[in-house]
Amino acid sequence: PGQQKRYTKSANLEALKALANKIGSAKLLETMAQFFRNELPAYEWPSRSGYSYSLIERTERGTPSYRVYVAIYVSESHPKEVQLVFNRRARQAAEESFKKFLSEHSKRFKDKSGHLETYVKSESDWNNLNKSIEPLLKDIIEGWKQRSQGEIISGNSISESE
């Protein structure tokens, strides 16, 4: 019998690490992932090609749901690099901060349907960029908190310490 592909967290992580190793992006991917784990009180989910960082929101129906704000990806078409994506909702949560951020990094980021994307090419490239991302993440978190203020999400709230 043929083996079915499983998309569990552990299977995704295994596939992601294999891809990152194959294309020479493993160290940079892990460095960036560690940064987001430290700076963003978000739920990290590995896909077969990257990590997404989600914050909890209420859906249109009022049920709690994780929504992606930031993601990092690796791809065979960009060896030794990691793609960084700020989701549209991250921009909406910190509009003024993104305006300032883009005034410094406009040549680097491409706007794809409201999402901001760039490729990080090396550890030193990342070290230069992440200094200006730190304050941006703080403002995204503040904006997210303000948007979800007053909404008590029982059992699934994200604390600052996570």
Image (cartoon, helix red, strand yellow):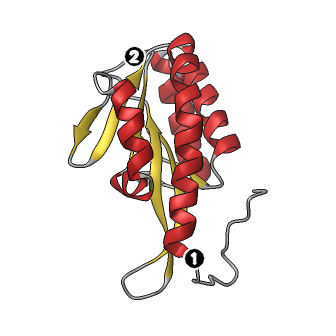
| CA distance for labels 1 and 2 | 41 Å
Q: Amino acid at mark 2?
A: Pro
Q: Is residue 118 above or below residue 122?
A: below
The x and y percentages for residue 110 are 26, 32
Q: Position of residue 27 (x, y in %)?
A: 61, 20
**Viewer can see residue 8:** no
Looking at the rendered image, the disc whose residue lies closer to the viewer, 1 or 2, is: 1
Question: Looking at the rendering, which quadrant does residue 157 occupy?
Answer: bottom right
Q: Nearer the viewer, residue 3 or 41?
A: 41
- For label 2, the residue is 79
The three-letter code of the residue at mark 1 reads: Gln
Above or below 40: residue 31: above
Residue at position x 48%, y 19% in the image: 22
Does residue 41 appear to the left or right of 129 in the view shown?
right
- Label 2: how many residues lie within 10 Å, few (<14), some (14-19) or many (20+)? some
In the image, taking residue 142 as reference, residue 34 lies left or right, namely right
Q: Which residue reaches farthest right?
A: 161
